[in-house]
Image (cartoon, rainbow, N blue to C red):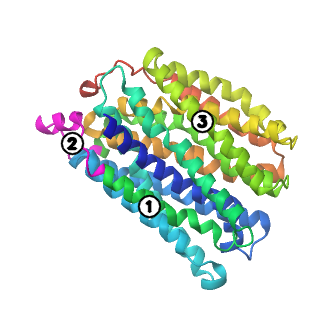
Amino acid sequence: MAKVAVASFIGTTIEFFDFYAYGLAAALVLNKAFFPELSDVAGILAAFSTYAIAFAARPVGAAIFGHFGDRVGRKSILIVSLLMMGLSTALVGLLPGYATLGVAAPILLVLLRLVQGIGLGGEWGGAALLATEHAPQGHRARWAMFPQLGPAIGFILANGSFLLARVAAPDSFATFGWRIPFLVSFILVLVGLWVRLSITETPVFRRAAQAERLSRTPLAELIGNQWKRLLLGAGVMMIQYALFYTATTYCLSYTTSVLEIDQTTMLIIVMLAVIMLGIATVVSSVLADLIGRRRIVMIACSISIGWSLITFPLINTQNHLLIWLALAGCLSLMGLSFGPMGAFLPELFQTRYRYSGAALAYSLGGVLGGALPPLIAVQLQASVGSFAVGVMLAVIAIISLVCMSRLPETRTADLDQVSA
């Protein structure tokens, strides 16, 4: 299990490192590098739109990789997804800006983001299944915790690399320094590839294959048999994505451009806040095996409703400690609700289409909770004020709470016998 844990952990760490590196670049420099002809607000919206494109591509990747993951196995598909997202991310770091290529630069950026998003769409679902389908019953959430640590570790690595690049070469950060994390990420991809080549296929999938219980059309069966669980699972994921990307990507842009807080200071504050995400993920994963997935996630969603409303009043004080408190609270709540999901989403679906179901629920939640809220937040802040952004988060928390209340507890589920 240790090798499986590492294989699932390193893939999602690379996934989130790549994604967050782009999110940080979108918040800090991409508007100037690729959209210099636009106003500040329009440039930020354009940068976040290219960020959102990868979210929109993720369900496509989830459907493609989910199909083959359910047909031929989890391991081989995870290797392909890792290479796909790794190569596209490295190419973003090599892509010349608008000053060199003109309008071709943002077009190529969009294409690379599409490729990255498709690769990302297959990564988490496979990593979660790798851990969950290897783990013994009663300990699945604890082992599925490892892919769930990817967001915290990936963000700390991405944020740390951006911080080092900014401190080491502040004068060249906007032109070249921001590219370094994208290029360095490919080294992590090679390490992940080496680890994944050494693992075996999951025992649950092997049993299904030996019994000839594999599906020829997993996506069609998923939609025909368990479409409600698919949509409800996506709804549960919404608040987790919304909390994370609002507290990191959007707030980084808001505090540096609107409140005019120093970028280096904010990078440090955000990185320290993300540590709480990692701690909360570990705690909630252990508790999920002891008292159930639903209870932990519903408690986190309930607290998120109130915390969302005080987040921006705390940030607007411009007090560094209170800003950290606001962000740490959001990320702790994200970790509390996110930790159990590594086991919970796979446990909702039958083996015949489990990869497709888990990956699609996760990716659709990303579109609704991760892609749209930062774009909406920019418009809300500009037209109504920052408190409206908190109201938006509270509404999303209510939606996720209702969705979770409609799903069954899965802690004692037999993965070979999931009911439709």
Residue at image position (41%, 27%) is 141
> Which residues, given as a range, are shown in magenta?
196-218
With respect to residue 96, does 3 lie above or below? above
What label sits on residue 187 in the rendered view?
1
What label sits on residue 277 in the rendered view?
3
Residue 208 is left or right of residue 275, and the answer is: left
Examine the rendering and report whether any part of residue 228 can be seen: no
Secondary element at tag 2: loop
With respect to residue 53, does 251 lie above or below? above
Residue 48 is left or right of residue 338, and the answer is: right
What label sits on residue 215 in the rendered view?
2
**Mark earlier in primary sequence (1, 2):** 1
- The amino acid type, in three-letter code, at marker 3 is Leu
Residue 159 is left or right of residue 54, and the answer is: right
Residue 158 is left or right of residue 257, and the answer is: left
Contact between labelled residues 2 and 3, with CB atoms less than 8 Å apart: no
With respect to residue 138, does 50 lie above or below? below
Residue at image position (59%, 51%) is 371
**Mark in front: 1 vs 2:** 1
Q: Report how far apart the C-alphas of labels 1 and 2 lie in the structure.
A: 36 Å
Residue 357 x/y as whole percent: 37, 40
**Mark earlier in primary sequence (3, 2):** 2
Residue 101 x/y as whole percent: 60, 84
Image quadrant occupied by the C terminus: top left
Image quadrant occupied by the N terminus: top left
In the image, 367 versus 194, the foreground residue is 194
Q: Report how far apart the C-alphas of labels 3 and 1 lie in the structure.
A: 25 Å
Contact between labelled residues 2 and 1, with CB atoms less than 8 Å apart: no
- The amino acid type, in three-letter code, at marker 2 is Ser
